[in-house]
Amino acid sequence: MPKPNNFNRTINQRLNKFIVPFVMIRRAPLSTDIKDPRTGKYYEPPHLWVVDRNPTDSSTEGDLWYLADINSNVADWKLISTSSTPGGTVTSLEGDSGGEVGPTSGVIDINGKTVANATNSKALHFKGTPASSLLDAEIQLASSNVGAPADSNKAGVCLFDSTNFSVDANGYVTLVGVSGSNEFIDNVFRILDDLDNTKKIAFQADQITTGTVRTITMRDSDLDLANVVEGPATAVDENLAIYDGTTGKLIKDSGISISDISTFSWREETGTSATFVANEGIFANNASTVTLTLPASCSIGDTFIAYQEGAGKVRVAQNASDVIRFNGNLTTTGVGGYIESLNQGDSVTFVCAGTNKYRVISSETSWTVV
């Protein structure tokens, strides 16, 4: 078959139908770039734009854009390839550890699992495994936190001991054996430090139905409190003991008669002055006179004992309106009044008989009454 008269021109015309035109300019295209600056002709989609060397903007040499459309003199340029993401697609994932995960057969596997507490620096950690197409999503198990501030790395998945807790299908956690609208905890024990750093045991319980018997065991102290019952006392109430939190005395409740037991403490005073507190004995131990002042107020039955332990005498002073009665008919009144020991080893015991009334019920040898 004979060739056309201008065969080469015919080939070029045919190639131009399939070759995508492009420009190379030292910046990224803008929506206003609708004409070729070299020819002044409108770009026709598809059209390529390549960022040339030494860009004048923040783009990177070799960035590739294509013209999707021109509408109302606004050009829609799409970035299809950059030096950081060749081809414009994600080809790998990178976890917290910095490990890069590449796909195998176009697939990246994400594996979720739990790990021991403090395995990673975060409660939820993504660890890439290079060349294996595997990204591990690791969530650590929780751990208890002691003291403050809280350590966020102790956070994690927390499990509950099925002996004491129950977890339903919705994830709600309840105490085993506690249910209903009138929920209560049979016993709650707290170990508290009091002012002198000794330990006290505090007990708290809600009321329960009349006639119901509950046994409450304090395992750590080997002390059993049994038969706690609401309502009038019955034979099953014999083990109930209730203490006054302020005085430490046994009190009466629900018709139960319990003996009153007072607490009494002793201390040594090596200075030359001190003030009594209720139910206290003081060994005065100084070479000079030690003045012990009775409290400004007292309750009937409060007891005070003074003992001359050292060479210095013991003087028991009082406050305004107070009256000390000694040995029946001897009294001393007010701030200026006092009684004083004679010899080392002398002692005296006072009992409060009411407001401003202190009565000596026993003494060792004679005391001077002023």
Image: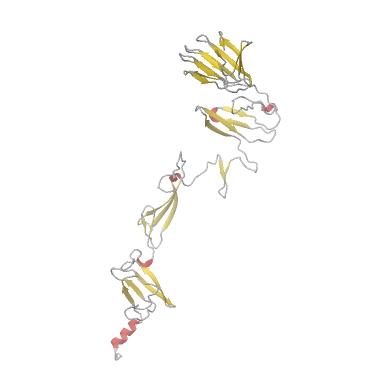
- Which residue is rendered at x = 53% and y = 32% of the image? 191
> Looking at the image, is 322 positioned above or below residue 70?
above
> Looking at the image, is 42 positioned above or below residue 192?
below
- The image quadrant where one finds the N terminus is bottom left
Q: Could you say which is closer to the camera, residue 306 or residue 188? A: 306
- The image quadrant where one finds the C terminus is top right
> Looking at the image, is 139 positioned above or below residue 211?
below
The percent coordinates of residue 161 (x first, y second) are 53, 41
Q: Could you say which is closer to the camera, residue 283 or residue 259? A: 283
Q: Which quadrant of the view contains residue 353?
A: top right
Q: Which quadrant of the view contains residue 243?
A: top right
Q: Which quadrant of the view contains residue 19?
A: bottom left
Left or right of 148 in this view: 354: right
The percent coordinates of residue 323 (x first, y second) are 61, 17
The percent coordinates of residue 6 (x first, y second) are 29, 89
Q: Could you say which is closer to the camera, residue 164 or residue 67? A: 67
Left or right of 87 in this view: 242: right
Left or right of 223 in this view: 238: right
Identify the residue at the far front of this view.
Answer: 336
The percent coordinates of residue 105 (x first, y second) are 39, 62
- Which residue is rendered at x = 51% and y = 17% of the image? 291
